[in-house]
């Protein structure tokens, strides 16, 4: 390293150093991009707002289901993971004991296999 520059281009390093020293930059960033949330990896500022934002966007499946899904219907377990929220899954010789939340249509398909 010569001339006191960091790895990479001197311009890039200088730009990063400038952001670290510029108070209020984080608070101005969302105004530049509608619907954005500024988060600082260095200080953690904005993490809670980001978590709240993500929580609002996540789907909330409304139907709770419990079923023993036969091994031959593993696609239903995969679908529960992809389209709903699996609360618990235990793989047994009879199949997968599944507790999940899902939308009405996937829930109906899984409910065709009630708990023994």
Image (cartoon, rainbow, N blue to C red):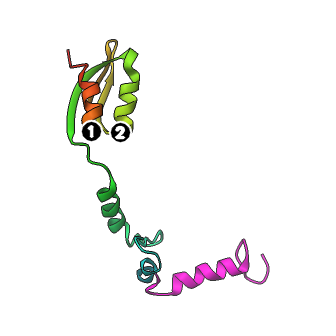
Picture quadrant of residue 19: bottom right
- On residue 103, the disc is 1
Residue 8 in the magenta stretch? The answer is yes
CB-based contact (under 8 Å), mark 1 and mark 2? yes
Picture quadrant of residue 104: top left
Farthest-out residue, top: 93
Badge 1: how crowded within 10 Å, few (<14), some, or many (20+)?
some
**Rendered location of residue 13, percent (x, y):** 66, 78
Towards the viewer: 85 or 109: 109
Looking at the figure, which quarter contains the C terminus?
top left
Q: Which residues are magenta?
A: 1-25
Badge 2: how crowded within 10 Å, few (<14), some, or many (20+)?
some
Q: Earlier in the sequence, mark 1 or mark 2?
A: 2
- On residue 83, the disc is 2
**Rendered location of residue 15, percent (x, y):** 62, 81
Picture quadrant of residue 28: bottom left
C-alpha separation, residue under disc 1 versus residue under disc 2: 8 Å
Horizontal side of residue 45 vs 6, given as left or right: left
Farthest-out residue, right: 2
**Does residue 95 lie above or below 41 as drawn?**
above
Q: Secondary structure at mark 2?
A: helix
**Does residue 95 lie above or below 77 as drawn?**
above
Horizontal side of residue 115 vs 14, given as left or right: left
Q: Residue at image x 46%, y 79%?
A: 29
**Rendered location of residue 49, percent (x, y):** 33, 68
Residue 21 in the magenta stretch? The answer is yes
Q: Secondary structure at mark 1?
A: loop
**Does residue 35 lie above or below 28 as drawn?**
above
């Amino acid at each position: 390293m010569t001339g006191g520059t960091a790895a990479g281009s001197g311009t890039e390093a200088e730009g990063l150093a400038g952001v670290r020293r510029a108070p209020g930059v984080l608070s101005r960033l969302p105004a530049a991009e509608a619907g954005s949330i500024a988060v600082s990896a260095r200080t953690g500022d904005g993490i809670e707002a980001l978590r709240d934002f993500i929580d609002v966007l996540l789907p909330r499946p409304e139907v709770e289901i419990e079923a023993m899904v036969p091994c031959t219907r593993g696609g239903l377990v995969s679908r529960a993971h992809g389209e709903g929220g699996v609360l618990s899954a235990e793989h047994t010789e009879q199949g997968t004991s599944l507790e999940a939340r899902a939308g009405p249509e996937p829930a109906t398909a899984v409910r065709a296999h009630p708990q023994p």
